[in-house]
Every structure is written in structure tokens, then in C-alpha cells.
Image: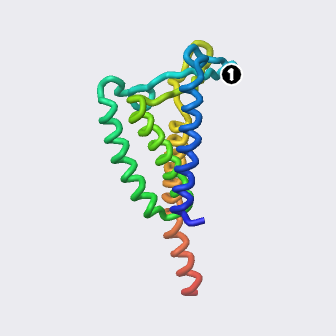
Amino acid sequence: MNRRVLGGFCALAVLSLDQSTKALAMNTPELERGVEILPFLNLVRVLNDGVSFGLLGGIVPWWGLVVLATALMAWLLIWLWRAPDRLTAAALGLVIGGALGNVIDRLRYQAVPDFLDFHFGTYHWPSFNLADVAIFCGAALLFWDSLRVAKDKTKQPEQIRSKRIITAG
């Protein structure tokens, strides 16, 4: 599969899954009060008007976040078009799909529906959604890939030297 097609497929898969789970969350009245799924996981509907963990909520208008996210997605699409390999393309697709899902929500609700509430005792991690999971996973893959590429680059001079020694001898 072409790397650009793979990235586009990942973006569309994330977008579809994200929007369908958010539609369920928005149309399930029980989530207003929260529903315990596991001893450490609740489903609870929260509208987040900020960015990650509610940062900048009420400070930056919703349309400002849409403009910023759209500009970032344009940059990510250019990066995807030039992606050197399938891992980078898939990772970028995850980030693009998640970002697009959150932009759609900001246009629709002027906020992003979050519904996953992980907790330990009385400590609750800030609620999030599947778009956030995809963005995190894509960014983590990009970070891991950058470390892998950097490690490969440090090995290249040794490999070049060893080839010279072998061919020179």
C-alpha cells in the first residue's frame, strides 16, 4: 500500500471511529451523570472548550482553536505528502484524523466532547476522547521513529568505515 494512501486510510479510520463514539456519548443521557465501566474507568460526558486537559479554556475563543488546528493540519498534510516511509505516514494519519475530529466538534459544539474518565481512587485524570488517543499515539510513533532514525544515522559512519576497510584490504 502506498504510504500516502496508508496515511489517508489511518486518518479516515480515526475520524470515523472518533465521530461515531462521540455521537454515542452525546446521545446517551446516562453519561451526563457518569457510568462506571471498570473500577478505574467511567464514561462521563464533558464538553471541553480548551485544548489538552482543558488548558486555555475560556481564554482562546473556539474559532481561534479551529484556525490554529486547521493550520497545523495543513502542515501535517504537507508532511504526509512528503513522508519518507509507511510508519511516518501512518503516524501522521493518526494525528490528522484526531485533529480533524476535534475541529469538526469545535465547529459543531464550540467545544470537544470528552467521555473517557480514568481514575485511581479519588484522583481523576482529565477526561479525553478517541481523537486524543489517536493524536497521542501518532505523536508517540513520530517521536519513537525520530529516535530510531537518529540511532541509525550514528551507525552509518561506522558501517561506511568498515566497508572502506573491507574494500581497501
Q: Is residue 34 above or below residue 96?
A: above
Q: Which is nearer the eye, 56 or 73?
A: 73
Q: Quadrant of the C terminus?
A: bottom right
Q: How is the image coloured?
A: rainbow
Q: Position of residue 59 (x, y in %)?
A: 30, 25
Question: In the rendered view, does 64 fall on the left or right side of 126?
Answer: left
Q: Position of residue 148 (x, y in %)?
A: 54, 56
Q: Quadrant of the N terminus?
A: bottom right
Q: Which is nearer the eye, 45 or 87?
A: 45
Which image quadrant is residue 103 in?
top left
Q: Which is nearer the eye, 52 or 5?
A: 5
Which image quadrant is residue 58 in?
top left
The residue shown at (52%, 57%) is 89
> Total of numbered circles in the picture?
1
Q: Position of residue 128 (x, y in %)?
A: 52, 29
The residue shown at (40%, 49%) is 73
| Element assignment for label 1 | strand
Q: Position of residue 46 (x, y in %)?
A: 49, 22
Query: Which residue is disc 1 drawn over?
Result: 37
Q: Which is nearer the eye, 99 or 15?
A: 15
Which image quadrant is residue 121 in?
top right
Res. 144 visible in picture: no
Question: In the rendered view, does 19 fall on the left or right side of 50?
Answer: right
The residue shown at (37%, 42%) is 69
Which amino acid type corresponds to the residue marked 1 in the rendered image?
Answer: Ile
Q: Is residue 90 above or below residue 101?
A: below
